[in-house]
Structures are given as C-alpha cells and as structure tokens.
Image: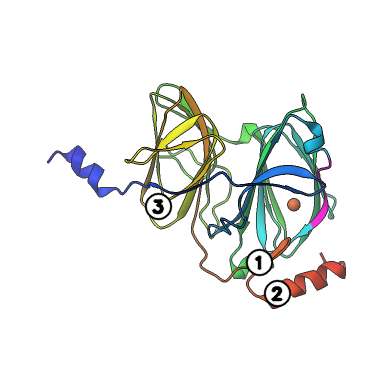
Amino acid sequence: MTQDKLNQMSVSTRELKYVTSGQMTSDGDGVKLVRLIGNRHLDMLDPFLLMDVFSSDEPQDYIGGFPPHPHRGFETVTYMLAGLMRHKDGMGNEGVIGPYDVQWMTAGRGIIHSEMPEQENGLLMGIQLWINLPQKEKMCLPNYQDYSETQIPVDKFGACSSVRVIAGKRQSGITGPVKKTAINPIYMDVSLAQSDTFLQELTGTDNSFLYVIEGEVMVGDSANHLRAGQLGILTHGEQIKVMASTAEARFILLAGTPLNEPVVKGGPFVMNTQEEVAQAFVDFRANRF
Ligand code: FE
C-alpha cells in the first residue's frame, strides 16, 4: 500500500447525514425568511440553535425589519451577502452591516436591539445564526465582535477557488478573526470552482453543516449532492471534502463543539432550566437588560 493510500485511510471524511430545505416563515415585523435550524423538523444542532436565511428583491418582504427585541443566553451571528442591516442596541451601540460584513454578538445576560434592513438596489440577503453559550457564560456581559469585509481574510486555493475565513483555521494557516470560544467555531464562506476540491480539517466529534448559497456540490467520498437552498448536516469525522457539480458553487461551512447541556428555549431567551427562562422574562419586564 502506498503512503498516499495510507494517509487517505487514516483520516475519516464526513458524509451527508441529513438534508433539509427549511421552512418558510416570517419573524420580526413581517420579514419573510427560511428557517433551516430551529423549526419543527430540526429543533437544533448543538451548539447551533437557529439558522435563518432572508433573501428577497422585494422590499415589502423585509423592510419592516426586526424592531427592538431582547436576547439572553446565546450569541447571534449575522452575515450579510447583499443589502444593509442597521443595528442599534439599548446601550447606544449603532452600526450598519453591509455585504460580507459579520456581526458576532454575544448577548450574554441580556441585550435589547433592533435590526433594520436598508435597501441597496432592492436586494437583501443575509444569514443569521443563534449559537448557544455554555451554562457558565450565559450571564456574561454582552459583547460585540464586528468585522468588516476587509478584516475577513480570504484563502485562495486550487485553480480559482477561495474561502472567506470568518472563524477557524485553514490548512494554509489563514485564521478567521472571530475569537475561539468554548464551541471552537468554524465559519467559512466557500466559492468553489468545478475543477477544485475543498478540504477542511475538523475536530472529529464537532457538529457541522453546509448550506449551499449557489450551484450544487458533492459531499464526502460518497459525493452525495446538495443544491442551492439546502442545508446538509454532516456525520462526524476529521475532514470535510466538497466538490462542485456546477461550474461554480458557493456554500457556507459551520462547525462547533456540542455543549451537551440541557436547553430550554423561551422565545428570545435560551437557558438551561425553566426557572432561568422565567427569570429572563421577569428581568426583561423589569427593564433589567
Ligand atoms: Fe436579534
């Protein structure tokens, strides 16, 4: 057996385990979106509590935005692909997130904010994730990590493929700006040409998924297909391997270490017990956020 063959055998490659196109719904003040995680088919993928994709060229689908609302106990991660989102919180922080900018907000003990889309050529597309915090960090002080497009390194590979590295580390050494936390987050936005192969090492037991933004990809050694608008949860394993089955494909890769703690959701509050969720409602009504 050749050394190449041995190397291939020693690394387990992740395969597609579950595919979903999510559920159409609306949230905030009538923003139409697709909920891929956090719906009745897929409650969560520890530590990922929710994933929404909003994408429209019809301003009436999104212009109502998300008026002031609270969060406690987790992080919200907003990644814009088109259009603008104006963010404002109860502590006086305000800013606009544009295409390829990321806002990684740790709500911790509590934040009240609004997220209002603004038109740019009518187009709006963005992805929002809710990532759980471990019990010992749920009541931490709120924190923002805001990264503009230019602060997110691009790792070029193959003939003409590239990865925007938001969180995690590529084999090339290029590392995303998001701080490493208890869940060891990986967030990459991959543009893949048909001739190239995307490989990424992962901790074998971390949970991971892909969401295809454009085109169609083939996942793992079985080369199972995943197309635009679909989210695919992967099996465990030490590496991810993706090829494009269309001339170009674009997808995001998310991975994180499961917290394996009890999860109790109460609207915008995600805690470990019912009592803690009830306390969150009490604190919110008493203006303690
Ligand atoms: Fe929010």
Residue on which the image places disc 1 = 138
Q: Give the CA distance from mark 1 to mark 2.
A: 10 Å
* Residue 184: percent from left, percent from top: 51, 54
Mark carried by residue 235: 3
How busy is the neighbourhood of tag 2: few (under 14 within 10 Å), some, or many (20 plus)? some
Type of the residue with mark 3: Thr
* Residue 239: percent from left, percent from top: 37, 46
SS type, badge 3: loop
Q: Seen in the image, is 260 located left or right of residue 78?
A: left
Q: State yes or no: residue 67 in magenta.
A: yes
How busy is the neighbourhood of tag 3: few (under 14 within 10 Å), some, or many (20 plus)? many
Single out the mark in the foreground, 2 or 3: 3
Type of the residue with mark 1: Lys
SS type, badge 1: loop
Q: Which residue lies at the image location 44% right of the left edge and 33% below the top edge?
A: 217
* Residue 236: percent from left, percent from top: 39, 54
- Asked if marks 1 and 2 touch (Cβ < 8 Å), the reply is yes
Q: Main SS of the magenta segment?
A: strand
Mark carried by residue 276: 2
Q: Which residue lies at the image location 63% right of the left edge and 66% below the top edge?
A: 137
Q: Which residues are magenta?
A: 64-69
Q: Kindly tell me whether mark 1's CB lies below 8 Å from ligand 1.
A: no
Q: Quadrant of the N terminus?
A: top left
Single out the residue that lies furthest toward the bottom. Answer: 275
